[in-house]
Amino acid sequence: MRLNKDTETLRKAKPSTRTTPVLPSTKTGSLDSTKPILETSIGQERMRLEEEAQQFKAKKRYNGPPKPMTSRIYLVGMAMNALLCRTHGPVRREDIKREAEEWADFMLED
């Protein structure tokens, strides 16, 4: 088997010696470590996060009586559905809402 000139030149310049592979460090802070760097109190931290999540969830809910469905609200919803279906790109919500309300008012004029 004949090696090309470049390979022969490389072999002359750098003798081939076997080296032991360098293993990654397993010290704390290493990327290969499976142990967390900082030990935390899991119980207290989890309780705090759960309480915060429950407060956030309760804040978003509407707890009042259900709002009555009027014919205008129904028509606004139908018009908004049609306007969103025909749009093929980003839209401003205010524009869609305004146009849907205009269509509902137009439908109720009769």
Image: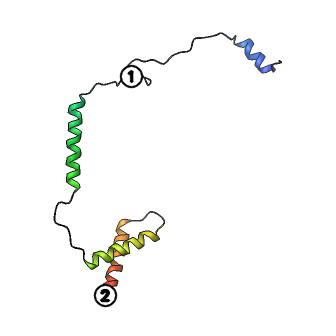
Q: Is residue 55 left or right of residue 108?
A: left
Element class at badge 2: loop
67 and 21: which one is in front? 67
Left or right position of 66 against 3: left
Task: Name the residue at 42% across, 69% down.
Answer: 84
As drawn, is 50 to the left or to the right of 14? left
Q: Are marks 2 and 1 in contact (CB under 8 Å)?
A: no
Within-10-Å neighbours for mark 2: few <14, some 14–19, many 20+: few
Q: Which residue is mark 2?
A: 109
- Residue at the extreme left of the image, as rendered: 64
Q: Which mark is residue 29?
A: 1
Q: Residues within 10 Å of mark 1 (few under 14, many from 20)?
A: few
In percent of the image, x 42 and y 65: which residue is there? 91
Above/below status of 66 relative to 70: above
Give the image location of residue 33, x and y in percent.
41, 22
52 versus 108 height, above or below: above
